[in-house]
């Protein structure tokens, strides 16, 4: 998918990660049950796909909706428990965006801390003040990027070396999930291309906001080459429902259906990203 803004564009890839087995990534027993095109009176069109998990009896429906004369992508979700037992689920929408030394992820202004999976480790955000994923960001803040962590391709410049919102500052595979925020948005922006995107969803339903990267160093470049058509690199900016961490499962009671929507809008020609201003826009 390409979100275009004026003459600039930001390429992003969207996939839903509706997990109905007790692992985040791994083999699934789900099968594609049906596909349908739904046309609405306002001119919008939704392309529906329905998956059924044979092991658990759970069903997930996802509809990608495009609206006329509106620069946005809407993802509609319906999660259904057709069994007579309480079932667990984990649902995150996974957006991958091309990145470089100019790329920055942004989050609501109340975000002060981020957490690893299962909250095994935490860090201040955006300026890290200690160890995170084995990287001494406190030392980076004082002495800059050490020689053994200096990237060969995307060298950070013009911002603090301990700023976790900048892809180029993270040398190793790293996840962080936002902890305890009440904002309805987050996203990413390429200051060089002057293009990016913003994700919007009701934080009471979708509190999860996460960034994942393979890291701006040789190990990460190798994975980027394996997992992209033209060598990457990319970050994943993920949005989760009913939880702010992974793997933290939610529940569906027998016969229960949960429905929700998430939205992605393009951003362009922003001289400076100011979360407080974005809060006003939302």
Image: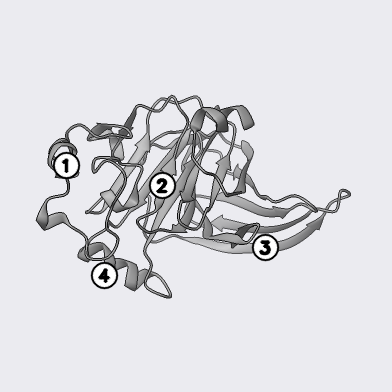
The secondary structure type at the circle numbered 3 is: strand
Q: Position of residue 55 (x, y in %)?
A: 47, 55
Give the residue drawn at x 50%, y 24%. 182
Figure quadrant of the N terminus: bottom right
Q: Position of residue 42 (x, y in %)?
A: 86, 48
Left or right of residue 265: residue 206: left
Residue under label 2: 104
Q: Earlier in the sequence, mark 2 or mark 4?
A: 2
Q: Residues within 10 Å of mark 1 (few under 14, many from 20)?
A: some
Residue under label 4: 222
Marks 1/2 in contact by CB < 8 Å: the verdict is no
The foreground one among 54 and 99 is: 99
Q: Residues within 10 Å of mark 4 (few under 14, many from 20)?
A: some
Q: CA distance from mark 3 to mark 1?
A: 51 Å
Residue under label 1: 140
Q: Is residue 99 visible?
A: yes
Residue under label 3: 34
* Rendered image quadrant of residue 6: bottom right
Vertical position of residue 150 compared to residue 227: above or below:
above
Q: Is residue 81 visible?
A: no
Label 4 vs label 3, nearer the camera: 4
Label 3 vs label 1, nearer the camera: 1
Figure quadrant of the C terminus: top right
Q: Earlier in the sequence, mark 3 or mark 1?
A: 3
Q: CA distance from mark 3 to mark 2?
A: 38 Å
The foreground one among 16 and 50 is: 16
Marks 3/2 in contact by CB < 8 Å: the verdict is no
The secondary structure type at the circle numbered 4 is: helix
Label 2 vs label 4, nearer the camera: 2
């Amino acid at each position: 998918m390409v979100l275009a803004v004026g003459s600039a564009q930001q390429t992003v890839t969207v996939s839903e990660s509706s997990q109905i087995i007790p692992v985040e990534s791994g083999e699934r027993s789900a099968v594609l049950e049906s596909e349908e095109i739904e046309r609405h009176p306002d001119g919008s069109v939704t392309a529906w796909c329905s998956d059924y998990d044979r092991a658990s009896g759970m069903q997930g429906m996802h509809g990608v909706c495009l609206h006329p004369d509106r620069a946005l992508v809407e993802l509609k979700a319906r999660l259904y428990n057709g069994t007579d037992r309480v079932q667990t689920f984990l649902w995150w929408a996974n957006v991958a965006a091309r990145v470089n030394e100019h790329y920055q992820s942004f989050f609501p202004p109340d975000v002060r801390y981020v957490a690893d999976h299962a909250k095994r480790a935490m860090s201040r955000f955006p300026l890290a003040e200690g160890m995170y994923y084995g990287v001494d960001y406190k030392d980076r803040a004082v002495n800059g990027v050490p020689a053994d962590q200096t990237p060969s391709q995307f060298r950070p410049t013009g911002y603090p070396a301990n700023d976790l919102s900048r892809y180029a500052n993270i040398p190793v595979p790293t996840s962080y999930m936002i902890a305890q925020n009440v904002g309805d948005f987050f996203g990413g922006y390429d200051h060089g291309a002057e293009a990016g995107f913003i994700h919007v969803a009701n934080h009471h339903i979708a509190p999860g906001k996460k960034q994942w990267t393979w890291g701006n160093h040789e190990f990460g470049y190798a994975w980027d080459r394996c997992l992209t058509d033209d060598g990457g690199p990319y970050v994943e900016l993920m949005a989760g429902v009913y939880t702010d961490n992974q793997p933290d499962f939610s529940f569906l009671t027998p016969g229960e259906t949960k429905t929700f929507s998430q939205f992605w809008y393009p951003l362009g020609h922003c001289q400076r990203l100011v979360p407080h201003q974005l809060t006003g826009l939302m």
